[in-house]
Image (cartoon, rainbow, N blue to C red):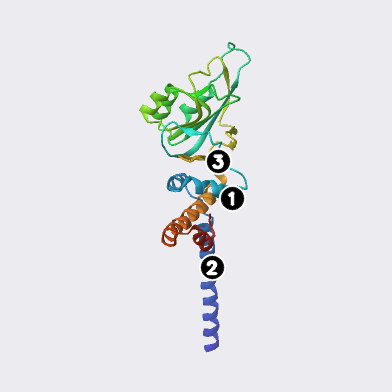
Amino acid sequence: MKMKQGRFLVLLKAMICTLMIAWLVPALLSAEGAELSLTQLIEGFNKATLGSVADAVDQVTGQRGFMYHDMRPLFKAKIVGPAVTALIRPSIQATGPQVPNHSLMAIDEANPGSVLVIVVEESLDISGLGGLMATACKARDLAGAVIDGAARDVDEIVEMGFPVFSRSITSATSVGRYVSVGKDIPVQCAGVTVNPGDIIVAGSDGVVVVPSAKAAEVLDIAQKIDEKEAKMVPLIKEEKSILKAVDKYKRL
């Protein structure tokens, strides 16, 4: 009788262990592989320094994520959000059949919080965005716009407070000079490929593109870099030496 009871207890324990493993392992795997929501990513990148985000993209992808140095804000601002893209290129003739204006369509179809990315091929003298488009972007609660080309109506845009990053400023319109090619397509913007949905992080140090598939990993590394540098600052002040801080934290 005692042997039967002992065997029963052993079997019972084994069943309990099996059930616990069956419940715990998927839960742990799920927690480890859980993706951050878009809201969490935007919140995290808003707090991260732009330099750390650029460094994190370098580490994760092995490629640059930072745009050319001349991509500058019309006024001081930080924007973070998923990209909606549009492309225009020089037209062979100033007049011709009506074609869809994908830049305007992209604005009207964009979700709140998106970042409009317009590429004006082959020229920094032609505007990709002006006052009317900026007004529409602001009315639709877009986070901002990044223009590989020029912006115009600068005073109007600054007054309304809509964040715009561009490579130049001009008075020239694209109307009659450029034709719309497409929207929601991969584009080459100021030296970096931008796919629809990639996270744009822009501020005083420029513009960085975070591939959407790697966004959570990039954010994690960027946060770790920021944490490490935050610890280095008081040590540098105390020791009056940057070399000692770099040696201790292996970060520069």
Q: Tell me the distance, in whole angstroms, between the alpha carbons under discs 3 and 2.
A: 45 Å
The local crowd at label 3, few if under 14, some if 14 to 19, many if 20 or more residues have their Cα within 10 Å, is many
- The local secondary structure at tag 3 comes to loop
Find disc 2 in the rendering and name its residue. Answer: 21
Nearer the N terminus, badge 2 or badge 1? 2
Amino acid at the residue labelled 2: Ile
Query: Could you tell me if the residues under marks 3 and 2 are in contact, i.e. CB atoms within 8 Å?
Result: no
Q: State whether residue 42 is above or below residue 229.
A: above
Q: Residue at x 62, y 48 (%)?
A: 62
Q: Which mark is residue 66?
A: 3
Residue 241 location in percent, x, y? Answer: 47, 59
Check disc 1 and report its element: helix, strand or loop. helix
Indicate the quadrant where residue 90 lies.
top right
The answer to which of 15 and 163 lies nearer the viewer is: 163
- In this rendering, the answer to whether 248 lies above or below 110 is below
Dot 1 or dot 3, earlier in sequence: 1
Residue 125, located in which quarter of the rendered image? Answer: top right
Q: Quadrant of residue 144?
A: top left
Q: Disc 1 designates what residue?
A: 60
Q: Nearer the viewer, residue 16 or 96?
A: 96
